Amino acid sequence: MNQLSSYIAPAAPATRRPVDGELPYLRPEIGFTPAWYRQYLDIDFGERWHTDPVYRKESVLDMRRILNQRFPDTHFGNTDLPLDLLTGTHGACTIAGIYGIPIRYEKQNWPAYESNYFTDEQMSELVPPDLDSNPFFNALLEQVVQIKTMQGSVTGFINWQGILNNAQRLRGQQLFMDMYERPELVKHLFECVYKTMTDAAKRLYKVQADAGFKVSFFTISNCLVNMLSADLYREFVLPFDKRLAEEFGCIGIHNCAWTADPYLESYAEIPNVGYIDMGLHSDLVKSKELFPQARRAIMYTPMDLANKSYQEILADLERIATDYGPCDIVAADIEAGTPDDRILFFINTCKAISKRYN
């Protein structure tokens, strides 16, 4: 079965990509917020960054240069061509944008969706948008065509999120009450979101494949799963996660840095899991037993990286290697002000530990 590994493009939220070749036993994947880049570069991460591939290309080249300057001898500022000019576009708000939820673009942050939630009446009448006539989706495809013209290929990945994340963007916190009060309405909303996610992804993947870049997997972002009990996840979300795995043949499951323990048994029922991540306080031994074939990952929080002592970080990495490796260790969302030395210590410690296993 194919494996996926964590992937963070410059100034983009973390996503996944296929494993290419042998990976280190502990593989660090490092990512920085737009505000971190703004310390060194005059990049406006507002609407233009997300709608103008030419401007995005200029900024990606500038960000690669800064990464190479500050972290020489690492892969952060790699010189791979063609450039990835797709990953990060619209942040995690693409499906919300397709459904007409206003997106708020920020000069030094990722896009955020407005709290313009669907009413009960809108929920009852909801149907998946017609992508052929959807302005937001068609504008995205126009960017893809432009990238193909510029680069010859359309490398990269849109962050489609997951059923629960996207549904919450449309319904707000009322979604969680609906699960008790109007469960059929929730299932209807989830079905609409599922159809939109799969239809939009397949259309984009077709354009990318025609340009020589094949995407044959899907990533589920379950960032809000800890808002649900294990039973609610099993009833409402698991059926759609299974369908996504079957639809695309390889699936990545993202849990942010939450403790994944309540959901592990259900996740183990999902076919074709090529990647799964979770927080440090999850049952790592059990997770390794349940997902021996998947590429596993730990989401190491930016707070831990910035605030823990070097001895504590070392102890964390040793425990991860023993209980959970081989795996990725994802230090994403690093904020401005985090010393470079801490990041380099993290990377070099992963390398030193990996030498004992590889």
Image (tube, rainbow, N blue to C red):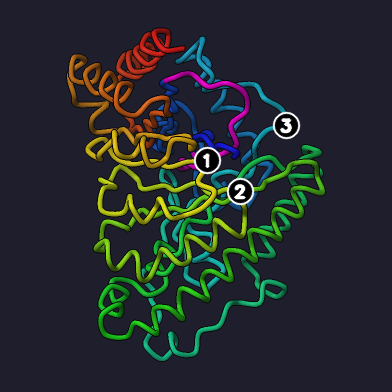
Identified at 58% across, 31% down, the residue is 19
Q: Position of residue 163 (x, y in %)?
A: 45, 64
- Report the residue marked by disc 1: 16
Q: Earlier in the sequence, mark 3 or mark 2?
A: 3
Identified at 27% across, 66% down, the residue is 231
Residue 48 lies in the magenta stretch:
no
Do the residues bearing badges 2 and 1 touch, measured as CB atoms within 8 Å?
A: yes
Q: Earlier in the sequence, mark 2 or mark 1?
A: 1
Q: What kind of residue is marked 1?
A: Arg
Q: Crowdedness of circle 2 by 10 Å Cα count: few (<14), some, many (20+)?
A: many
Numbered label tally: 3
Circle 2 SS class: loop
Left/right of residue 306 with respect to residue 209 in the rendered view: left
Residue 17 lies in the magenta stretch:
yes
Which mark is in front, 3 or 1? 1
Q: What kind of residue is marked 2?
A: Phe
Residues under labels 3 and 1: Cα distance? 18 Å
Identified at 42% across, 78% down, the residue is 187
- Report the residue marked by disc 3: 82
